[in-house]
Image (spheres, grey):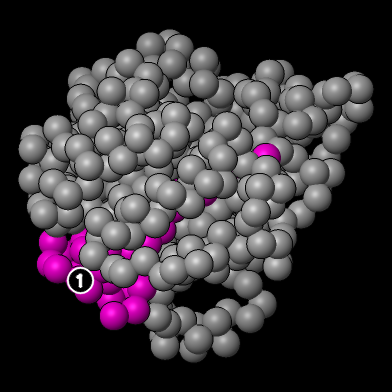
Amino acid sequence: MNARERFLATMDFEKPDIVPQWEFGYWAGAVRRWYEEGLPLKVGIPTREEWPDGRAVFHNRMMGNPGSPDDYDIMGELSMDKPTQRVPVTCFLSPPFQEQVLADMGDFYKWSDADGAVKLEDKTRVSMPKWLSWAVSGWEDWERIKAERLDPSLEGRLPRDWESWKQQARNRDYPLLIGDVQGFYGSVRRLLGPENILLAFYDHPDLIREMINYLADFWIKLYDQVLEQIDVDAALVWEDNCYKSGPLISPAMFREFILPAYQKITSLFRSHGIKHIIVDTDGNCWKLIPLFMEGGVTGMFPFEVAAGMNVVEVRKAFPRLQILGGIDKQALARGSEAIQAELECKVPFMLSQGGYIPSVDHTVPPDISWDDFRYYRLLLKKMMGEPVRKG
């Protein structure tokens, strides 16, 4: 079976020859450490100046940013599957705001990003930035962005080689997804800011409701045009609307403001034959899983262990939820015994239930050695049922 066939069989709770061998991704600092510890350098990654240690290197495009570098050396050394790819349509602001450094402040940059936010950020990007301003501060900003950057026309949103890309994608042996940054809490937060959106649910509920409803209609019109031209294997929605202890908004607020939008967009996906609709949200999402599923979502990731997400308990509570991730990154840093214990208590049970793709529960940090990461992947491969090559 190829990667596409394995993915579809796994998502359908069938038994592939082996479940897809994927990872979420790695901090660039981890990959650079691994090169020093024995990972053969054949392709490499960009320099620190081009790609700081705190930026991610991705294997799986379901989980990673299409603009990030790939982990070709890790993928090849550990014989991992071809990763997912995404339909190359710009699905948020078009044109984006211009990214530019506004001031060099020694160890920090003050810069504006593609979403129109201005931030102060450590040049290594190993910590969260300090945000200074956001693209939307009220109705006037929102109306301007709708008019200038959120037109659902495909003009300017497709690559120049769209026609040849479509032909190549029709003969693919990897899973193809539609979706990127879209999510109803996540995208509104990108425009308002993480504090402002929480206040706006109370102070400006009409603005929040209008933004969510407009984005739902915008994506339906945009994706309907794309899906008339190409079939895909799954849809991806990015949210990040939870933190370590629970959701950033209550289930009641999710039901009132966000659930109707999910029901609309997942209906569009299903009308185009897409059975698998997967949400990316970090943190403790226990209270929102039933609402996501009610909204038409079929799977989720990455199930961060430090946030209280145990995939065995999630599977027992939600037998038909597709689950990706859930392997504790902190266990990998504690050596082979901890790695073995972590895998043994989760992977055999999860594989027996189906609908599960194991991987680390977020980006692999640089405190994990190459020997320990390699041990983890080879032991995982053995549990999946594939003979481990020697050497």
Quadrant holding the N terminus? bottom left
Give percent across and percent down for residue 103. 90, 27
Q: Quadrant of residue 125?
A: top right
15 magenta-colored:
yes
Q: Residue at x 34, y 23 (%)?
A: 307
Along the line of sight, the residue nearer the viewer: 235 or 217: 235
Q: Residue at x 31, y 40 (%)?
A: 340
- Which residue type carries mark 1? Pro
Q: Which residues are magenta?
A: 1-29
Along the line of sight, the residue nearer the viewer: 30 or 379: 379
Q: Which residue is mark 1?
A: 16
203 magenta-colored:
no
Q: Residue at x 39, y 31 (%)?
A: 331
Q: Residue at x 8, y 35 (%)?
A: 317
Label 1 secondary element: loop
Q: Is residue 196 above or below residue 321?
A: above
Answer left or right for 325 relative to 138: left
Along the line of sight, the residue nearer the viewer: 274 or 144: 274
